[in-house]
Amino acid sequence: MAAPSPSDEIRYGFVGTGMMGCEHIRNVVALPGARPVAAADPVASSRAAALEAGGGTLEVTADVDDLLARDDLDAVVIATPNHTHRDVLARVLETDLHVLVEKPLCTTMADCLAVRDAARHRPGVVWMALEYRYMPPVARFLAELRAGTAGDVRMLSIREHRFPFLVKVGDWNRFTRNTGGTLVEKCCHFFDLMNQALPGRPVRVLASGAQDVNHLDERYDGEVPDILDNAFVIVDYDDGRRALLDLCMFAEGSRWEQELAATGDRGKVEVHLPNFMEAARGRRAELVVGSRGPDWPVHEQVLDDDERVRFVGAHHGASYLEHLDFCQAIRSGAPPAVTLDDGVWSVAMGLAAHRSIDEQRPVTLAEVGLAAG
């Protein structure tokens, strides 16, 4: 399929219309020059949700093959449960459709590498949905680092203190076998941000984590959920830089849901993002820049919203901005700005962190099937 010209409407299909799939539909409804056309999901309640999200205009089916057989689609969004991504991608990648696949890419390294290899020489855009890099406050943070505001960044820390995992269709996200584990399912976003903020490649991970509070009183067919709800993860890079993730998923009362801080030889750059309840009360994200210069000045700035965003959704407008770039790549024939290789590295870091916790030792990326270079 040739890329549409800049004047063409991009017609979307959606595979998987649970919470995140419907989020994508709502973004596309608001997107100029794009239209949701059809969706596939085996669950009747999810199909009903897709109809509502699409304003009643898109067609729904229970069968992904019915969707892929249509001749009126340009692009497809995959937002099925994590453990189904490889099978769904195997079918989608046989078409010429442009593809945006939700994170994480897959739940195992073998599946990630197989999918990446299958997509390598096919026509069309294949885009990895790691939208946290598109959150406007995070994008500003990364821009400051690239501009040299902190100088040569040697240390990066990311804190997410938030609410527990949400309920999803069929409760699939309550078990590691379906998600890849919390540090894959949730934290691939943050590992991707580490790789965006630091110039080297991760080589070694040391982690400590547990399931201490959440979901312990839940039972699904007699099984207790096994997903971690807190962790510290240290990542060493091949050039000596290091990054830290501090995750807590029983911290609803935090003023800032995410806090990112990068420290270099010239200073420090931080960005703070409010939780959605604080944001609803009017709290805005803020940027803090500190210098090692005379008197150690520190400057704080409340950040404005990105004026391009027509649908804010659950991630500060990140998914909308991601779709803008996805559509631009389709129209121009440009390569994806977020690649399956980005998805592979973010999953590998999560898998290494889980192995580090399980085996109580540092784990190299090579041990999970990926090496720098």
Image: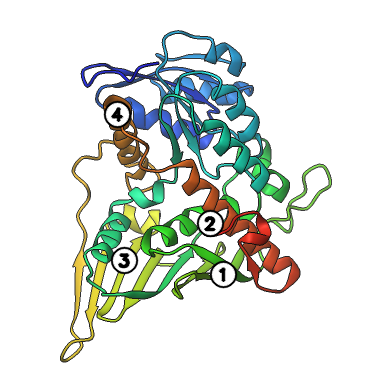
Q: CA distance from mark 3 to mark 1?
A: 20 Å
* Number of residues whose C-alpha sits closer than 10 Å to that of mark 3, classed few (under 14), some (14–19) or many (20 or more): many
- Residue 10 lies, with reference to residue 170, above or below; the image says above
291 lies left or right of 234: left
Q: Earlier in the sequence, mark 4 or mark 2?
A: 4
| Circles 1 and 2: CB atoms closer than 8 Å | yes
User: Regarding mark 3 in the picture, which secondary structure is present there?
Assistant: strand
Residue most extreme to the right: 222
Amino acid type of the residue that numbered disc 3 sits on in the rendered structure? Val
Of residues 46 and 133, the one drawn nearer to the viewer in this rendering: 133
Q: Nearer the viewer, residue 225 or 131?
A: 131
Residue 210 placement, left or right of 30: right
Residue that label 1 marks: 233
Measured as percent of width and height from the top left, residue 1 is found at 40, 16
Q: Which residue is mark 3?
A: 271
Q: Amino acid at mark 1?
A: Val
Q: Are marks 3 and 2 in contact (CB under 8 Å)?
A: no
Under circle 1, the secondary element is strand
